[in-house]
Amino acid sequence: MNILESVAPLAESHDGFILDIWGVLHDGEKPYPGVPEALRELRARGKRIVLLSNAPRRSWTVAEALAEMGLPSTLFDGIVTSGEVAWTLLRDRTHPFFARLGRRAFHIGPERDLSVIEGLDIAVTRSPAEADFVLNTGPDFEHGRESTAPYQAMLEAAAAKRLPMVCTNPDRAVMVAGHRLICAGAFADIYTALGGEVMEIGKPDPMVYETVLATLGLPPSRIAAVGDTPHTDLAGAAAVGVDAVWALTGLAGDHFGPDPSPAQLDEEAEREGVRPMVALRSLRW
């Protein structure tokens, strides 16, 4: 697999970019070196950019966080988060899974993620016994963010009540400032093993790409999707027929270290069942 040192060659072959956020643009606290400059160079060349994230929150909250990091909305054409898609599905109730959900949710996750139900007729309960479904947005600060063990009892209680689960972040892990933390997808795996019913909202589901592709308004052959995770970012790109670019930052950087060989990448891609067109050392010009 060819490893690019710069995004510049992709700007010659592609007109639109779908960029993951955590692990591609920033490390959870600050942008990776060269990212603001790379985005400005792409914009200066008329490239269209949409950010697509499995963040379990509304898009506006992510936009605010990016602006605080020095990545203002002028650097991209839009943001789509899994939380935004989940909010729409919970609001409209036209999808068969969501049409049969009740209005009482047992929330697993931090309070900051409750933008995913803001303005909706949904009450948060204190226990699974009072709930109609589980709203899984990921680990909270009280129970910890590095292990699923503290959440096991609540997951078992919800499964025993046969509550359906809405998982608003299919990622299993994320890198934040060099630390590997669990995400909502890790709870979804446990819940499935317990016999629970889970609806995961986010990459790689083609549904979350609908707004992204409409915003870009380009032929798939002219679009590249850049992400650090094979089973979400790279698989999602393949599912909608756009070129996948494997960013070697974020989870990929944690997995491979600073200087993976092309052979290592090829072997891992084969294990994951993905075929990225190229790898990118980091999003820099």
Image: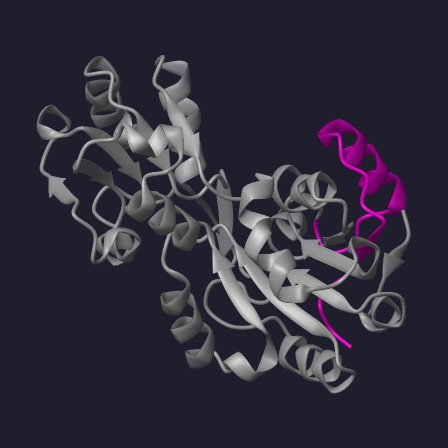
Query: Does residue 23 appear in this view?
Result: no
Picture coordinates of residue 194, whole percent (x, y): 35, 14
Q: Residue at x 60, y 58 (%)?
A: 212
Q: Residue at x 44, y 53 (%)?
A: 55
Image-based side of 206 in relation to 97, left or right: right
Using the image as rendered, state which of residue 269 and residue 197 is in the foreground.
197
Image-based side of 16 in relation to 206, left or right: right
Picture coordinates of residue 264, whole percent (x, y): 83, 39
Color encoding of the figure: one colour
Using the image as rendered, state which of residue 26 and residue 209 is in the foreground.
209
Task: Indicate whether residue 262 is drawn in magenta.
Answer: yes
Picture coordinates of residue 166, whole percent (x, y): 34, 35
Is residue 269 depicted above or below 153 in this figure? below
Q: Residue at x 25, y 51 (%)?
A: 117
Image-based side of 61 in relation to 132, left or right: right
Task: Indicate whether residue 159 is drawn in magenta.
Answer: no
Using the image as rendered, state which of residue 261 and residue 35 is in the foreground.
35
Q: Residue 102 occupies which quadrant of the picture?
A: top left
Q: Residue 40 occupies which quadrant of the picture?
A: bottom right
* Quadrant location of the C terminus in the rendered image: bottom right
Q: Residue 12 occupies which quadrant of the picture?
A: bottom right
Residue ranking furthest to the bottom: 44
What residue span does the magenta drawing correspond to? Answer: 257-285
Image-based side of 177 in relation to 141, left or right: right
Picture coordinates of residue 47, whole percent (x, y): 74, 75
Query: Does residue 60 appear in this view?
Result: yes
Give the number of marks. 0
